[in-house]
Each structure stands twice: as C-alpha cells, then as structure tokens.
Amino acid sequence: MTAFPKILLRTFLLIALGFAAYWLLSLDPDAPSDIDWDANRQNLPDISTLEQRIETSFFGEEAEGTEGMSADIDEVVNHSAMEIKLEGLTKNITTRRQPTDKELAAFYAEHRAQYRESSRFSFKQIVFSRAKHGGQARLKAMQALQGISETEPQGDQSTLAERYFSATSTKIDDEFGNNFAQKLFELVKEGDLPCWAGPIASGHGVHLVCIENASLGAIPELEEVRSQVINDWRFSVVEEN
C-alpha cells in the first residue's frame, strides 16, 4: 500500500470512529437530548490512542515511539526491586568487608596527605600555553625562570587571573586542574615561600608561580575521617583484585 492511500485510509477510519461514537451516544435512551459533549469527552479515546489502535489493528505495526510499551507503563515503581538491582550492579565496584584496625591504619598512613583539610594560597602566576608553544611550553617556562632579574617574567594571555588572594585548594584545583594545589603545597612544605618557582603543569599549560602566603590545612586524626577512609580502603581492595 502506497503512502498516500494509507494516509487517506487512516483519516477515513478516524472520521468513521468519530461518527460511530456519536451514533452510540445518541442511541442511549437515558441520555438527555442536549448531550454535553464536553462532559462526555472523557469517555472517548483521544486521537493519539485511536491512531495507535488503527496502526496496530489495520496495518500490523506499532505507532512510532511506542515500541516496547505495555499496558502497565504507569505501574508504580517497586523501590525494593530497584534497590536489589542497584546492589547487583555495584557489588563488583566495592566490597562489604570491614578492614581490620591494622589494615586501616596502614592504609591511612600511606594516603594521609589526601585527607588534608583545605589549604589557602596567595600567589601570582604566569602561564606558557601549550596551544601556543606545543611541546616547547616547559622549555619556554624554564628559560623565563632562568632569565628573571629585576622585572617579572611575562607569559601568555589566558582566562586565569594573574593573582590569587587566599584561594582555597579546592578553588585552585577547579580552575587549574591536575592537582595544582598539591604542587603549590610541595613548593612551600619546607617553610619557604618561593618567588618565582616552577615550572609546574596544569590543564592550561606550564606555569611559573610566586607564592606570597600559604596557610596549609591540617591532617586530621584517623578517627575523625574513619568512615571516609574505610570507603577508600574498600575501593582500593577491589582495584587490586
């Protein structure tokens, strides 16, 4: 059947069904003479439902976008069943085993730096963009560092600020990426405030920094972050297996 006759047939069937519905209502002996069609409209299937029935009954195909749909499409979600499914999906991601005190202490001792509270840094920075210098960005930064005298080095233009005041390690990592705050921390962990220093890499390129002030976050005791450390230990166990 060509497309054009098929469209005509659909239209004819819809009109016929409409007249049939009108005729059935008019035959109802209890129906008032002045039938309120707006009030009775809810008893009639809507156009999309009629089209779907026509497609299925007369053309042997389901309406577009309804494949796989069933009568219980509005069935209330079974949350218990959903939780079981999610548990099955995640069972290979982590483990339920509880670490011993010795295992947990050893894990925390090895990774304690990552639980450090937020640090704050005030610093100036310049960047040598990889977009401009490619693989020569680090070399350009090193050359600029070696040539520093009375004037400050000049880098490339970027969307980054040239100076940051008391920026948290979280904000710094959000803007620079690549654990940039940890790299700043490593420059000042001996108690010095280097100016200028580097080069250190970020998602934007290679930087030279002048650290003016640093307030390093404290590392909490194991018991203060025990739940988080247990979760991290569980993920590490899965990754090792």
Image (tube, helix red, strand yellow):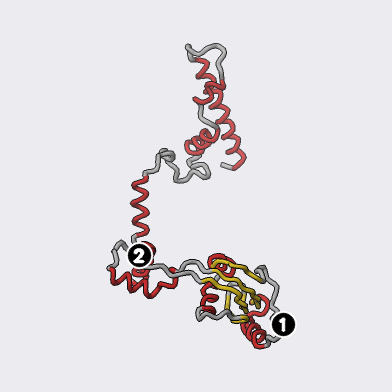
How many numbered badges does the structure rendering display? Answer: 2
Badge 1 element: loop
Label 1–label 2 contact, CB within 8 A = no
Which residue position is annotated with label 1?
A: 151
Q: Can you tell which quarter of the image residue 177 is in?
A: bottom right
Amino acid at pointer 2: Glu
Quickly name the residue at label 2.
223
Residue at the extreme right? 151
Q: Earlier in the sequence, mark 1 or mark 2?
A: 1
Nearer to me, 142 or 12 = 142
* Residue 96 on image: x %, y %: 30, 61
Residues 217 and 135: in front is: 217
Q: Amino acid at mark 1?
A: Thr
Element type where label 2 sits in the image: helix
Residue 84 place in picture, x, y as percent: 33, 51
Examine the rendering and report whether any part of residue 178 can be seen.
Answer: no
